[in-house]
Amino acid sequence: MTGVEVEPVEGSETPFGHGRMLRKEDRRLVRGRGQFTDDLQLTGMLHLAILRSPLAHARIRSVDTLAAEAHPKVRAVVTGAMLEARGLAWMPTLPGDRQPVLATDKVRFQGQEVAFVVAEDRYAARDALELIDVEYEALPPVVDSRRALDPESAVIRDDLPGKSDNLCFEWETGDAAATEAVFARADVTLSQEIVFPRVHPAPLETCGAVADYDRVEDRLTLWSTTQAPHAHRTLLARFIGIEEHRIRVIAPDVGGGFGNKVPIYPGYVCAVVGSMLTGRPVKWTEDRAENLTSTAFARDYVMRGEIAADRDGRILAIRSHVLADHGAFNGAATPSKFPGGFFGVFTGSYDLEAAYCSMTAVHTNKAPGGVAYACSFRIAEAVYLVERMVDILADELSIDPVALRVANFIQPDQFPYVSRTGWVYDSGDYPVAMAEALRIAGYDDLRKEQAERRTRGELMGIGVAFFTEAVGAGPRKDMDLAGLAMSDGCELTIHPTGTAVVRISVQTQGQGHETTFAQIVAQELGIHPDDVDVIHGDTDTTPYGLGTYGSRSTPVSGAAAVLVARKLRDRCRDIAAHLLEVSPADLDWHRGTFSVRGVPSASVTMRQIAEAAYGDAELPEGLAGALEDHVTYSPDNLTYPFGAYICVVDIDPGTAVVKVRRFIAVDDCGVRINEMIVEGQIHRGLTDGIGMALMEQIGFDEHGNCLNASLMDYLIPTALEVPDWETGTTVTPSPHHPIGAKGVGESATVGSPPAVVNAVVDALEPYGVRHADMPLTPSRVWEAMQKGGSSTR
Amino acid sequence: MEVSVTVNGELVTRDVEARMLLVHFLRDELGLTGTHWGCDTTNCGSCVVLYDGEPVKSCTILAPMADGHEVETVEHLEVDGVLDPVQRGFMECHGLQCGFCTPGMLLTARALLDREPDPSEATIREAISGQICRCTGYASIVRSVRWAAEHGGDGVEGAGLEEVR
């Protein structure tokens, strides 16, 4: 048997594309034969280590590298001043800010890059870091985003001419006046401060690179942990001094990304510079502390949510103000027109009269980032806000949280639905997804059980959340990264023997692209997925595209794959028509075979067509020769996956430990290509949600010291903290995606945190708790129990 | 210093620094890159190998400490082209996504099944609880180990497993 199994299609022996299929990439990964960046060993390769700032905010007085340079195994020691001489001390960030590769004037967060060493082995490189002497003049750090704009706070970004405060940007969306008018006449208005703390994607593989610069040819090959190889190539070419056609970026196997591996980090640039200086390949692999303290964090939003409703539970308007902590540099990987990401979808799944959001983003002495951890460009924050506010309203009105949601849902006949903040939801059937979740959960019985347990003093909570995401960026006129439009190319070749190779621009970090994209093409061409090879992760061998994040692989690149396959299939139809001597319109297509309508015996297979195209068959102009084509796809709109989640928790009244007993997730991501892979994506996100809700946080002390710089302090769920998942499916195809798929990579990460928090708050109802901020550690829960109703503001 | 370790059935001897971690010995000295490294603090378990048959985190052991001991890595699970049932189980049940934690999970699963051929879900969760997976949410790993238990979890060959290409 082969490693690939496709569900048999009834009445057909012809292999079929979509369906549960074991993953192609697993063959190497279960054998330990994956190749991750740190696995690479090149002849003569040196190792790079980075010296980082121990202080959050300080002026650099001097950097003494003499002792490090004298280390017998050291080949180069580089400081910010040396990079400055090459014009490389600063690099652009994705949203148009800048960030030091190595600090020159000041350090602005703990863990910031100050110098690097290139040495013969990784141990020696680390040793030499100890020999570098940096003299710092400590400056007062700005740690609390609420204080960042105080006049007395130190100005962090004094590198920017004329900068006299810590404002990063201000942004608003919606109609302030209309929203105010609705709030003024509403029966009920509620307000709550809701914090989504700083968290970190913490992929198990940290970031790293191997740079190999060829001085003779002026060519750079960069193997790196990237989710966006093509974007990285262009961004590097813009500032590093090597023309783009001389740069090759290769993403080998990537050990998880979740948004952490979208930006270019100083370490990649250091590796390139190290290779340029030494003339040898240079490997840089960050350690876990470096990953947690210096690479893209996520969230860090202090949100003021307000909701207005009628007494009978009709939600009229939502208003929010967000204080966004962007850290020392604006490194948020987000489209230029969307400084606050897609937070504008904070109206959620509800049909409102008005909505308004204002956002103030500030700089603090913390690591840059902000858009990461499977957030769908800040929709994780938006969904958390609205789903908490709806629960708070339900509590106020004493309406069941399910009933309140259902009563306010955008109805199926309202799609395409234009939200009050201008987002065009493509399709949805929210009531059916909610009903399915309730059915799986046995919701009514759960409520009865809860009531019964409460009489015994037991703390059981049932949390409900309903999310709508906007993914698959994006229409190229609106969505970009650093000025590069978010469209994706796809190249497809059918070989003379009828097998195919598809070249894609997006980059798997575990999502299974080698399988899914083979299935997509197989479905369109009617050949077996095993006969379709997927090439990805190398800018020299794949078409241009913006990479994998924002759940965009299937919505964008997947659509490109469908369209290029259909294009080639159409050409094959013309060839078939010629071979069968009929008009193309007289041909039927069925899974890899064209046959003359009404004469099924007169048929040709894709393989015969390929043979003819490449062979000596006499074919009209344009049909003979290589069967290959290319498509660049820019979607008409985003896709809007949605889902209904129910979480059941038990809280130990003595210890305040939260145990997630059940988690029910009904996801509608449109048409599913490989059910197994989709389920896996959902399981992952649900685990994220439990992690964020209950244990994950990147915290800082008043000096700006990161308190969660290791996996001992940054807690990630293990198998003991998560339940077996109960999942359900509804399918509402996207009307504009060629196969109706919507994308699913981040749905569960976005949808699950409010379900868990709502469950915990529900469990604490006997204590009068209406809100408590994540992470709901035992101490936080205990605190909420003590404060009771006074925890609500 | 000279260190001799039996790795995947072969005695290997290398002259290494006394402070070298076993994980780096395996990866950098022997080129066995299936064993991964993911944290500095022995929390993640990407580096788990079998050490005299027991799963241990190879970032916690210095290479010289392994002198005279037996180490098995993920590269040793497949025998003569036949996958270990745990490898097959992870493929069948989607027990991996990015594949970074997988070698460690596979070896822990192997050791568990050697000790307890028919483990409950709770036992499996306990066994892998010292390791982190960021992709699967663990349920599919649990199912993968169960699959292996039901299809030759004792490691006996010929449990109906054919070669997987």
Image (tube, coloured by chain):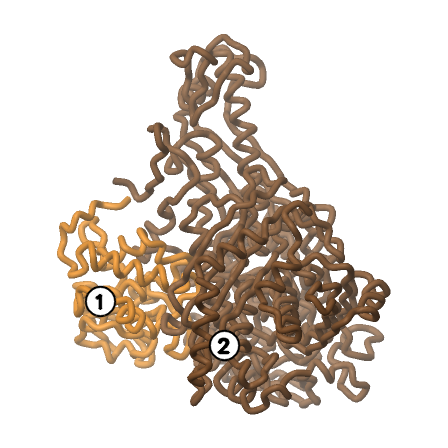
Q: Secondary structure at mark 2?
A: helix
- Relative to B111, is A519 above or below? above
Q: Nearer the viewer, residue B54 or A89?
A: B54
Residue at image position (32%, 52%) is B91
- Quadrant of image for the N terminus of chain A: top left
Q: In this orientation, does residue A407 appear?
A: yes
Q: Position of residue A470 (x, y in %)?
A: 63, 54
Q: Are marks 1 and 2 in contact (CB under 8 Å)?
A: no
Local crowd size for mark 2, using a 10 Å CA cut-off: few (<14), some (14–19), many (≥20): many
Of the numbered discs in the image, which one, if any, rests on residue B119? 1
Q: Position of residue A733 (x, y in %)?
A: 56, 43
* Residue farthest toward the top in the current orientation of the protein: A581
Q: What's under tag 1, amino acid-wise? A: Pro
Whether residue A67 sits left or right of residue A413 in the image: it is left
Q: Colour of chain A?
A: brown
Residue at image position (79%, 69%) is A186
- Quadrant of image for the C terminus of chain A: bottom right
Q: Position of residue B137 (x, y in %)?
A: 41, 64
Chain identifier, orange in the render: B
* Same chain assignment for discs 1 and 2: no
